[in-house]
Image (tube, coloured by chain):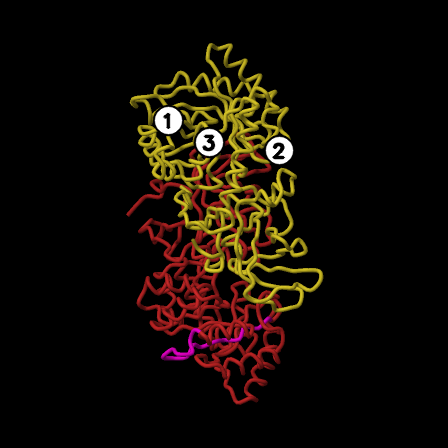
Chain colours: A red, B yellow
Amino acid sequence: MGEWSEIDTPAVLVDLDVVQRNIQRFQTYATTNGLAVRPHIKTHKLPKIAEMQFDAGAVGITCQKVSEAEAMVAGSDRITDVLITYNILGAGKLAHLRALAGKIMLRVVADSEPVVAGLSGAFADADKPLGVFVECDTGAHRCGVSSPEAARDLALIIDRLPGLTFAGLMTYPPVGGAEAVQDFMTRAKALIEAEGLSVETITSGGSPDMFRAHKPSVVTEHRPGTYVYNDRSLVVRGVCGYDDCALTVLATVVSVPAPDRAIIDAGSKVLTSDLLGLTGHGHVLDRPDLSIDQLSEEHGRIVSEGPIGLSVGDKLQIVPNHACVVTNMVDGVHVLRAGEVVGYWPVPARGKVV
Amino acid sequence: MGEWSEIDTPAVLVDLDVVQRNIQRFQTYATTNGLAVRPHIKTHKLPKIAEMQFDAGAVGITCQKVSEAEAMVAGSDRITDVLITYNILGAGKLAHLRALAGKIMLRVVADSEPVVAGLSGAFADADKPLGVFVECDTGAHRCGVSSPEAARDLALIIDRLPGLTFAGLMTYPPVGGAEAVQDFMTRAKALIEAEGLSVETITSGGSPDMFRAHKPSVVTEHRPGTYVYNDRSLVVRGVCGYDDCALTVLATVVSVPAPDRAIIDAGSKVLTSDLLGLTGHGHVLDRPDLSIDQLSEEHGRIVSEGPIGLSVGDKLQIVPNHACVVTNMVDGVHVLRAGEVVGYWPVPARGKVV
């Protein structure tokens, strides 16, 4: 179809061959280890890539917002099983949740009584109950109940409230948290089962530790997000190489004002300011000697130790620190097969902040 | 019109009373000091706020991208004078530039021969020449020619090339750069005038130093952006107070998992990861004891030294570190007058990355 040189920059490129390889690699690992895969679509926000994940064997998808789930479901009739890993609160969102739950198999998480009370209020007279997982804090210190006992107590409340059914346990662990997940979930499962409830699914997430996802053997399902594209943060952590990075930002050198400095047209509006603990704002492919030391909204500043060797008009391909947040910045991505641009895909679940 | 409580969160609120006061304050200062005001619309991306700036006395607007200028011009027939402070390169963008220049008074900047050659190629047979400013690096080390002599040389090239006319000098100085601007621009102006060219406009920018914009007396025009909303970065720099911050993010507490920790539904997808050199990700209005110590895409983590005093469902209003980048994250903003929600304005120039 098109030539790269015809793409207006900055632009986000997604190499579908690499995507396919990344999906397959994790699916094979998970299947081998008896884990169900429920990819988090925050990374791609594209119904077509969700379909590629289903083709490989994914059991459903994970979304973070009702609005994101709505956009995904509207984009593919194969998206019929969605877990929203977020506390849904407020009349507006609950109405959307209820409407969407009428169309597909939809489940959510909760970590407090006020949240489950709201869910129950919205689903008390629904045709089918809403499945609710208890979110557990296994060390990330974000959301989640803080002890197995609290997980049991909330599971019992969910079980008793009208319109709801207890679906299992969910966590988003910190990197290196396998042992803590195993301890927390094993104890919580035992406490809940002792009350006569079954814990069918224990779902965990995260890409940095994805190939150790089977280590907490109590876990039944994994929700990787970034793995589909990979990014500089995962390369630096040793999880993959730059050849495994499917998403890149194509940028043009717009100024070479000094021998050791160049400016590209990709700034924080496309690469974002997300450092993910790294130094610099991305990796320039084939130029490991360069670093992107500063971003403003529309400018990226590249510096080098020696002569920079770039000219105005040159194109560069950049692996961002964090792929997921880049996807959210653009209305569409250019997709590649065998190195050729084969299409432009709008990103329907972009910008779903509510 | 609406109640705050009916707004789904996270949401961006813009207080138009504060906007109007901010616009008027800087305009009065600039008029008093003989400076023209050409606001940078990157902060609001809203044609209606550009009109408020015109009402106060702005001579035109500044945009950073052709696509941004197109969206603004499409949104108001009063936007007839636009300066794009960016090196425009490539056939696609040049064609858009040429088309837009046929409709309004449009000018651009350049800092190298390849850029002006491209502009000349696109405008050689245009009805009217394109005005081109020479961008000068007065210490920010982003784009710009690095010496007054180089500014003169590029001005002469612009003057000789078909389709172009030399419009003046432009800079985006670092904070505290008044003296360097004065020295650079005075020398460049003299060198250019010695060649028989006039330097009608010398345009500078930036909000942190905006009330010292007259200090480099050679400057004739200022391009403030953030001043229209202000933000935490400007409060910390002592330029304004939180009462002068027109843009806030309304968020809901979705979890209070520990006595000293709460989670809100505003993460990097709305607040962005832009630190602007600060610690923490925004200021919670009326709660200076809280800090937002960590963001993930959909979660903001709030911590406190003592008891956090928040409950699930509470609403918080947050002044972001950097207002401009927040505007770009949302499809629309809720506007307030006298503390009441009076409308929802789509942000037409959002996401114009190309």
Do residues under tags 3 and 2 come within 8 Å of each other at their CB atoms? Answer: no
Left-right relation of A76 to B195: left
* Tag 1 residue: B105
Left-right relation of B104 to A315: left
The amino acid pointed to by label 1 is Met
* Tag 3 residue: B85
Q: CA distance from mark 1 to mark 2?
A: 30 Å
Residue B205 appears in which quarter of the rendering? top right
Left-right relation of A335 to B288: left
For the C terminus of chain B, the image quarter is top left
Residue A291 versus residue B215 in the image, above or below: below
Q: Which mark is residue B175?
A: 2
Do residues under tags 1 and 2 come within 8 Å of each other at their CB atoms? Answer: no
Residue A136 appears in which quarter of the rendering? bottom right
User: Between tags 1 and 2, which lies in front?
Assistant: 1
**Residue A322 shows up from this direction:** yes
Residue A196 position, x and y percent, is: 52, 89
Frontmost residue, A6 versus A59: A59
